Image: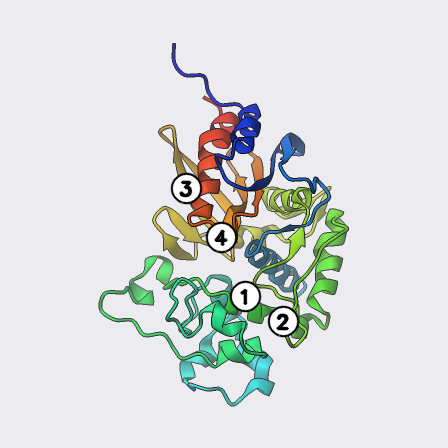
Amino acid sequence: MGATSPTLDDITPAVRAGSYQQITSVVVARGDRVLYEQYFDTLGAEALRNTRSATKTITGMLIGAAVDRGLLHGESRVLPFFKDRLPLANPDPRKEQITVEDFLTMSSLLECDDENQFSRGNEERMYLVEDWVKFTLDLPIRGFPDWQLKPEQSPHGRAWSYCTAGPTTLAELLQRATGQRVPDFAQAVLFKPLGIETVKWQYQPLGAAMTGGGLQLRSRDLLKLGQLYLNGGRWQGRQLISEAWVRRSVSPHANAREDTDYGYLWWLQTFHVGGRNIPTYGMYGTGGNKVYVLPEQGVVVVVTTTNFRIAGAGALTDRLFTSLIVPAVSGP
């Protein structure tokens, strides 16, 4: 007899045994039906989870809501929103071509790479100064030595590097485009219609919301955000985000890693499980905090953690996802 396939009930003992370090919650739903929900700390279902950079994906949703209302375009250039920040350091005419979409796809030409400690745009350098928008716009244009692919040589025509400063700059841009503070706009167009009642934003030193990370939400509310996109932007019969924006957001615009493309602040990752390819799109944050959407299975998975200081925390969450969750929800 072959080995028994995992069931969702196998998650609980595996997590409690410490196999995945500090997992705080796991929620799995197909359609509107929650298949599995468990909290592994003392805080429970009502706790606000700091999912770090998963916030970036929500920023993309808010940009979409502004585009849907005709307040902004993906092709809108960034610099005209910030004439008060001129003149810029490292002036270059190519900066004038940077668009909202460049920040949504982590592929502006600014020298900004959080995964490179030597990068002038590394987020840790941004946190040291007061004006994060000026920090971003002052960055030099990135160079492409022979051993790196130039944008025109790259998949989808964009050279990708993970840059928190770009989505962070979208906070003040959104405020100027909509005439509302980001938390107020988010409440009106996204959170209230979804029935999300409690959120906690982080703020930049000059007062704008931190749209690059740190927004805290309940696990069940993270689930709703995944379900909203799985449903093509519809929630309880109401179109909150246009289907066109949802489709653009989860289409590949840049290549981030092997088997992983990047949409509009969504990770588009294909997992290989039991000889099958499982395409997903996801909201990812430090510590392995993740919301996975499985369009072919109609499933959304939320995993929250406090594995912030653990090396390979994202891979640890992926192992929980591929070894116990995917086999249980994808059938034989």
Q: Could you give the CA–CA distance between mark 2 and mark 1, rounded to whole angstroms?
A: 13 Å
187 relative to 324 in the view: left or right: right
Residue 189 pos. (x, y %): 72, 57
Q: In the rendered image, which quarter contains the C terminus?
A: top left
Query: Given contact means CB atoms under 8 Å apart, are the residues at marks 3 and 2 in contact?
Result: no
Question: How many neighbours does mark 1 have within 10 angstroms: few (below 14), some (14-19), or many (20 or more)?
Answer: many
Q: Earlier in the sequence, mark 4 or mark 1?
A: 1
- Which mark is first along the chain, 1 or 2? 1
Q: Which residue is mark 4?
A: 309
What kind of element bears circle 3? Answer: strand
The residue that appears at 51% across and 50% down in the rendered structure is 287
| Residue mark closest to the camera, 3 vs 2 | 2
**Residue tagged by mark 2?**
204
Q: Residue furthest top?
A: 1
Q: Secondary structure at mark 1?
A: helix
Query: Is residue 49 something one can see in this rendering?
Result: yes
Return the mark for residue 167.
1
Q: Earlier in the sequence, mark 3 or mark 1?
A: 1
Q: Amino acid at mark 1?
A: Pro
Residue farthest to the left, as pictured = 146
The local crowd at label 4, few if under 14, some if 14 to 19, many if 20 or more residues have their Cα within 10 Å, is few
Query: Do residues under tags 4 and 3 come within 8 Å of each other at their CB atoms?
Result: no
Label 2: element kind? loop
Q: Secondary structure at mark 4?
A: loop
The N terminus - image quarter: top left
Cβ–Cβ below 8 Å for labels 3 and 1? no
Disc nearer the start of the sequence (4/2): 2
Badge nearest the viewer, 4 or 1: 4
